[in-house]
C-alpha cells in the first residue's frame, strides 16, 4: 500500500505510518512525504481554515503523486473560544475512490503566554519554542508534548485522529467509501 502524506514534517509522516499500520496490520505499507501548499497560510487561525488546509493538502498530494493508494492531509491550527487560545488539527484522507474522510483532533488549551505571542502574529510552533525554551518543537512533541509532560505528543494525537479518519475506509456502514478496493 502506498500512502502519500502532504508534508515533509517527520511528525506527520510518523503519525500516518503508525495509523495505517494499526488499521491495516496485514499490509506492507510505504509512507512518503511530499511538499504541497495548504492554501491557508502557515498558521490557520480558525477551525474552518484548518479543515480547508487539510483537505487542500490531501487533494494536492493526489495531484502530485496520482499513483498512490491514499493521500493524507494534516493541518494544525488554532482558534479562540471564550478568550482561550486552543490548538487542534484536522486530518483529511483521500482514497483512490469515494469521498474524503476527515476527523478533528483533541483540542488543547494553550497558556496565556503562548496566546499573547500568537495574537502578535507569531506562528504557534515558534511561540511554543519561545515560551518553553525549546527548538523546533513542531517537529517533536509539539504543544501537546510540552504541556502534558510527554503523556501525549503531537504525533500520538495525530495518529489517533488519523485512525478515526480511516474508519470509513474499513467499515461497511459508510457506503460512500470503497472498502477493500484500493
Image (spheres, rainbow, N blue to C red):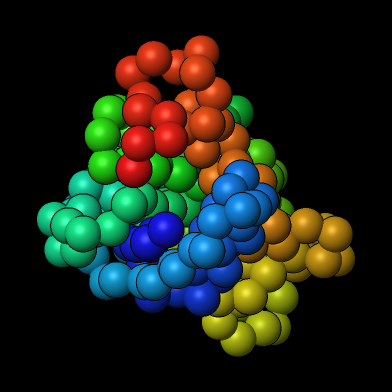
**Left or right of 33: which side holds 152?**
right
**Residue 27: quadrant of the picture:** bottom right
**Residue 127: quadrant of the picture:** bottom right
Q: As drawn, which residue projects farthest toward the left?
A: 63
**Left or right of 159: which side holds 177?**
left
Q: Residue at x 39, y 42 (%)?
A: 92
**Residue 148: quadrant of the picture:** bottom right
Whole-percent x and y of residue 165?
Answer: 51, 36
Q: Quadrant of the C terminus?
A: top left
Of 70 and 1, which appears nearest the observer?
A: 1
Regarding residue 122, the answer to whether it shows in the image is: no
Whole-percent x and y of residue 79?
Answer: 49, 40
Of 171 and 19, which appears nearest the observer?
A: 171
Q: Residue at x 44, y 68 (%)?
A: 31
Q: Quadrant of the N terminus?
A: bottom left
Q: Count how many numbered circles sit on residues in the image.
A: 0
**Left or right of 28: which side holds 56?**
left
Regarding residue 135, the answer to whether it shows in the image is: yes
**Left or right of 82: which side holds 122?**
left
Residue 101 versus residue 6 in the image, above or below: above
Whole-percent x and y of residue 164?
Answer: 59, 35
Amino acid at each position: 500500500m502506498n500512502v502519500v502524506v502532504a508534508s515533509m514534517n517527520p511528525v506527520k509522516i510518523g503519525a500516518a505510518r503508525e495509523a495505517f499500520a494499526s488499521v491495516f496490520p496485514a499490509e506492507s505499507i510505504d509512507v512518503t512525504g511530499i511538499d504541497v501548499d495548504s492554501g491557508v497560510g502557515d498558521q490557520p487561525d480558525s477551525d474552518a481554515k484548518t479543515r480547508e488546509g487539510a483537505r487542500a493538502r490531501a487533494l494536492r498530494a493526489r495531484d502530485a503523486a496520482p499513483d498512490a493508494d491514499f493521500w493524507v492531509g494534516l493541518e494544525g491550527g488554532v482558534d479562540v473560544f471564550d478568550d482561550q487560545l486552543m490548538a487542534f488539527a484536522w486530518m483529511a484522507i483521500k482514497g483512490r475512490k469515494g469521498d474524503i474522510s476527515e476527523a478533528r483532533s483533541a483540542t488543547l488549551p494553550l497558556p496565556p503566554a503562548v496566546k499573547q505571542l500568537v495574537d502578535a502574529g507569531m506562528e504557534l510552533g515558534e511561540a511554543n519554542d519561545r515560551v518553553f525554551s525549546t527548538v523546533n518543537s513542531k517537529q517533536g512533541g509539539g504543544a501537546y508534548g510540552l504541556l502534558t509532560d510527554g503523556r501525549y505528543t503531537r504525533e500520538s494525537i495525530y495518529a489517533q485522529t488519523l485512525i478515526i479518519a480511516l474508519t470509513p475506509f474499513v467499515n461497511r456502514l459508510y457506503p460512500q467509501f470503497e472498502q477493500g478496493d484500493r
